[in-house]
Image (cartoon, helix red, strand yellow):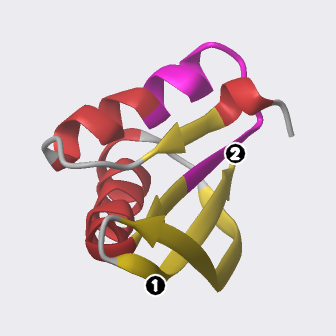
Amino acid sequence: MADDNVVYIGNKPVMNYVLAVVTQFNNGASEVAIKARGKAISRAVDAVEVARNRFIEGAKVKDIKIGTERITTDRGETNVSIIEIVMAK
């Protein structure tokens, strides 16, 4: 999958990410990956569900990957949960 078809979830409102996903599909992408980690995971799930149920007819969740990344912060190393949800049209 091209790196262009990836939406990284952060702290913005859910609808910003829904718009990003819809834009990717409208630009001709057949698959879009939504990636998030930590507290943004629930926002990623919300964005996928809103996009799938309200804006993109026929979109399916093709794959869900979960895991853990080791990151270095100012307090030392810690583990953070990650999720990647692949949507396909």
Give neighbour class at mark 2: few <14, some 14-19, many 20+ (Cα, 10 Å): some
Tell me the kind of residue under disc 2. Lys
On the image, the x and y values in percent for residue 23 come to: 47, 21
**Can you say whether 78 is above or below 26 in the image?**
below
Give 26 or 72, whichever is nearer the viewer.
72
For residue 75, what is the image quadrant?
A: bottom left
On the image, the x and y values in percent for residue 77 come to: 48, 80
Tell me the kind of residue under disc 1. Thr
> Residue 89, labelled with which disc?
2
Give 13 or 46, whichever is nearer the viewer.
13
Secondary element type, mark 1:
strand
Give the residue displayed 46% in from the left and 84% down from the top.
78
Give 56 or 82, whichever is nearer the viewer.
82
Between disc 2 and disc 1, the foreground one is: 1
Q: Going by the image, does 13 lie left or right of 68?
A: left
On the image, the x and y values in percent for residue 9 come to: 38, 49
CA–CA distance in space, label 2 to label 1 = 36 Å
On the image, the x and y values in percent for residue 86 come to: 67, 59
**Can you say whether 19 is above or below 66 in the image?**
above
Query: Is there a contact, CB below 8 Å, between mark 2 and mark 1?
Result: no
Mark 1 sits on what residue?
78
Read off the magenta span.
Answer: 21-34
Whether residue 25 appears in magenta in the rendering, the answer is yes
- Name the N-terminal-most of marks 2 and 1: 1
Give the residue displayed 57% in from the left and 25% down from the top.
24
Give neighbour class at mark 1: few <14, some 14-19, many 20+ (Cα, 10 Å): few
